[in-house]
Amino acid sequence: MTQTLVPIDDITSGQWVAVGAANEYLCIDETLAGADDDTTYLSRTAAAMPTIWLGHVTAAVAPATTGGIVFGVRARERGPGLTSSLLAIDLRSDADGTIATRALTVSGTIWATTTWTLTVAEEALITDWPNLRGRIALQSTSALQVRVTAYEVTLPDPPPNLNGWWFPMWKFT
């Protein structure tokens, strides 16, 4: 069964502003498909180039390293005519350090969802599943304001357990 991990706390908020919720993580704890966009979101001007660290729901079952772990965000600029913002999106754990970093250029006033699939090598770096963390950092000072409404990590379905049986894909005639 596919598992979707969403933030359950903000470890450090780094000057992001929670809009529509009491805590920062509550603004982005939806799945990418179920994001409530303009109701709750994180907002920040680029002047301070802030970073937020997020704690995730712990995976019920750590997946086998298969090359199917996806992480992503849903973001947009505040208003029309603004320059684009550059976000750095990280996935890390306390014991393992940074597992993956991706850059995201956010431009325009339409909410856009962006996802990345980890490589098998990146997945192999994850050993500390209970302490998996996400980081969103604003990297550019040219934008006036960026908004983020969702952040998630999706773990693939585990392979079927065939209890050691192998079934050939041919028949004898």
Image (spheres, rainbow, N blue to C red):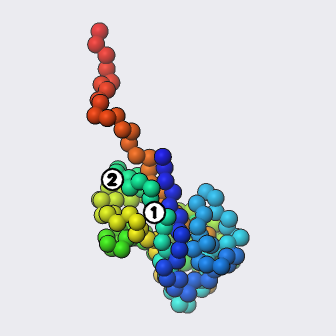
Q: Position of residue 4 (x, y in %)?
A: 51, 57
Q: Which of the two residues, 99 or 1, is positioned nearer the viewer here?
A: 1
Determine which quarter of the picture holds residue 163: top left
Label 2: which residue?
A: 65
Dot 1 amino acid type:
Thr
Say which element carries label 2.
loop
Q: Which of the two residues, 104 or 11, is positioned nearer the viewer here?
A: 11
Dot 2 amino acid type:
Thr
Q: Position of residue 115 (x, y in %)?
A: 49, 60
Q: Quadrant of the C terminus?
A: top left
Q: CA distance from mark 2 to mark 1?
A: 17 Å
Identity of the residue drawn at 29% across and 29% down: 166
CA neighbours of label 2 inside 10 A, class few (<14), some (14 to 19), many (20+): some
Q: Position of residue 143 (x, y in %)?
A: 58, 83
Identity of the residue drawn at 31% across and 20% down: 170
Q: Earlier in the sequence, mark 2 or mark 1?
A: 1
- The answer to whether one can see residue 115 in this image is no
Tell me: residue 77, above or below residue 48: above
Determine which quarter of the picture holds residue 132: bottom left
- Nearest-to-viewer mark from 2 and 1: 1
Label at residue 58? 1
